[in-house]
Image: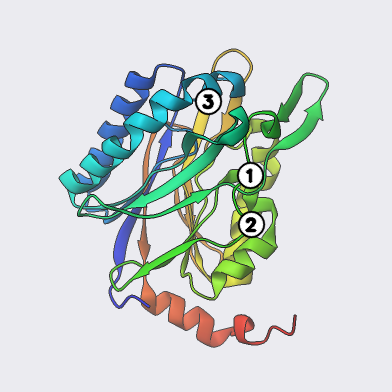
Amino acid sequence: MFSSSYKAAVIQMNSQTDLDANLEQAYDLVKEASKNGALVVGLPENFAFLGGLSMRMERADEIAERLPQFLSEIAKEFEIYLMGGSYPVPAEGGKVFNHSTLYGPDGTEKISYNKIHLFDVDLGDEESYRESDYVEPGMAEPTFYEDETIGGWGLTVCYDLRFPELYRALAGKSQVLSVPSAFTYTTGQDHWKVLLRARAIENTAYVFAPAQTGMHGPNRKTWGHAIIVDPWGEVIANAGTDIGVAYGQIDPDKLKHVRSNIPSLKHRRL
């Protein structure tokens, strides 16, 4: 458990298919968050490139080669913990992993996670997604990092949000649950905030959710509303629908208070 409160920042982007422009936007927003005192900064899912799934697969080699150095350098430059959203990394069989990382202020990678649950859904006649056509699921095990400065962080990505058993597995060792996302507009308007608050309440944990917003090409629209939720379920930061940064305080006293008053994690029978 960490002992001191710290500021965290969720970044909201409108990533497109220009890798250099996306990285420039990400750098500027991380810099802004750092200048405003954030110790932990999070980027959204597919922050470096948000084209179609087949396009992401085609660019995966280039993205996977550039991103570790990019994330390491800016984490070190601004002396922050940087949650590197997610980006495609080549996997066996011609597919990619949807890969999320956490870098420390010294520029080293602390932990990484490959998205487990893949977004295969039909939302209407003209809106369907088949992430599994191109993405290989990661190993079905909880991934978390812990130190005395930021506490325990559990890593997940976007569609994982709909699977509470993953967050329950993380909750025992995590005080913050990370959910970088590119939530669709269709589902986001009804489900995004509800699910994030539910994960916070049922696990008495902070939920940290950077997001994508707006149009990405002619047919893809994301919901936005990058938010941070506290262990009581209160939304303490919300970026709305604009590109930018939202800030919230991660407070160990708040966490202890909620977990003491409602010790549900200790009352589990299954």
Name the quarter where the N terminus is drawn.
bottom left
**Which one is earlier in the sequence, the residue at label 2 or at label 3?**
2
Q: Is residue 182 left or right of residue 44?
A: right
Q: Nearer the viewer, mark 2 or mark 3?
A: 2
Disc 3 is placed on an element classified as strand
- Residue bearing mark 2: 140
What's the residue type where badge 2 is placed? Ala
Q: CA distance from mark 1 to mark 3?
A: 27 Å
Q: Nearer the viewer, mark 1 or mark 3?
A: 1
User: Which residue corresponds to the image point at 83% horizontal and 21% vertical from the top-left?
Assistant: 125
- The mark tally for this picture is 3
What's the residue type where badge 3 is placed? Gly
The image shows residue 42, relative to residue 5, as above or below, that is above
- Residue closest to the far top: 218
- Residue bearing mark 1: 137
Mark 1 is surrounded, within 10 Å at the Cα level, by few (under 14), some (14 to 19) or many (20 or more) other residues, namely some
Disc 1 is placed on an element classified as loop
- Residue bearing mark 3: 214
Q: Do the residues under discs 1 and 2 have CB atoms within 8 angstroms?
A: yes
Q: Position of residue 180 (x, y in %)?
A: 50, 45
Q: Could you say which is closer to the camera, residue 236 or residue 106?
A: 106
Q: Is residue 215 visible?
A: no
Q: Position of residue 17 (x, y in %)?
A: 46, 17
Q: Is residue 137 left or right of residue 109?
A: right
Instruction: Kindly indicate the quadrant of the structure image that contains residue 92.
Output: top right
What's the residue type where badge 1 is placed? Pro
